[in-house]
Image (cartoon, rainbow, N blue to C red):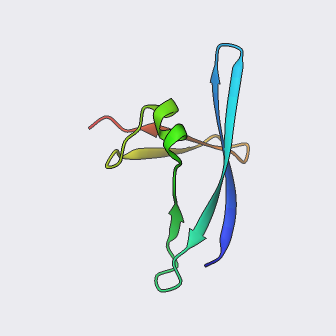
Amino acid sequence: MEKRSRRFKKENNNMKKSWTLHIEEDPETGDGILTFPPDLLEEAGWKEGDTLEWIDRGDGTWQLLKKVV
């Protein structure tokens, strides 16, 4: 599987925390697989099954928000 990296940052008050995640490629479908570590999920308030919205910030970065359904 091919790996690519994505960096995620959470800024809270004056504290900054970031994660670098590897995107793996499914060899059969070519789909990207991004696995979020438990501490990132906890910090972001996300859980398995949540729908995330990818927002292109126009500067080469992306913002992920939990989509309210």
Judge from the rendering whether residue 68 lies leftward or rightward of residue 39; answer left or right.
left
Compared to residue 35, the image places residue 58 above or below, namely: above
Residue shown at 31% from the left, 49% from the top: 49
Compared to residue 12, the image places residue 46 above or below, namely: below
Residue shown at 71% from the left, 14% from the top: 14
Judge from the rendering whether residue 35 lies leftward or rightward of residue 21; answer left or right.
left
Residue shown at 52% from the left, 50% from the top: 36
> Please, which residue is most extreme toward the bottom here?
28
- Give the quarter of the image for residue 13: top right
Residue shown at 65% from the left, 24% from the top: 11
> Please, which residue is most extreme toward the left here?
69
Q: Quadrant of the C terminus?
A: top left
The spot of residue 32 in percent (x, y) is 53, 68
Q: Quadrant of the N terminus?
A: bottom right
> Please, which residue is most extreme toward the top here?
13
Judge from the rendering whether residue 33 lies leftward or rightward of residue 48; answer left or right.
right
The spot of residue 9 in percent (x, y) is 66, 35
Compared to residue 28, the image places residue 8 above or below, namely: above
- Give the quarter of the image for residue 24: bottom right
The spot of residue 30 in percent (x, y) is 52, 79
> Please, which residue is most extreme toward the front here?
38
- Give the quarter of the image for residue 66: top left
Give the total number of marks visible in the rendering: 0
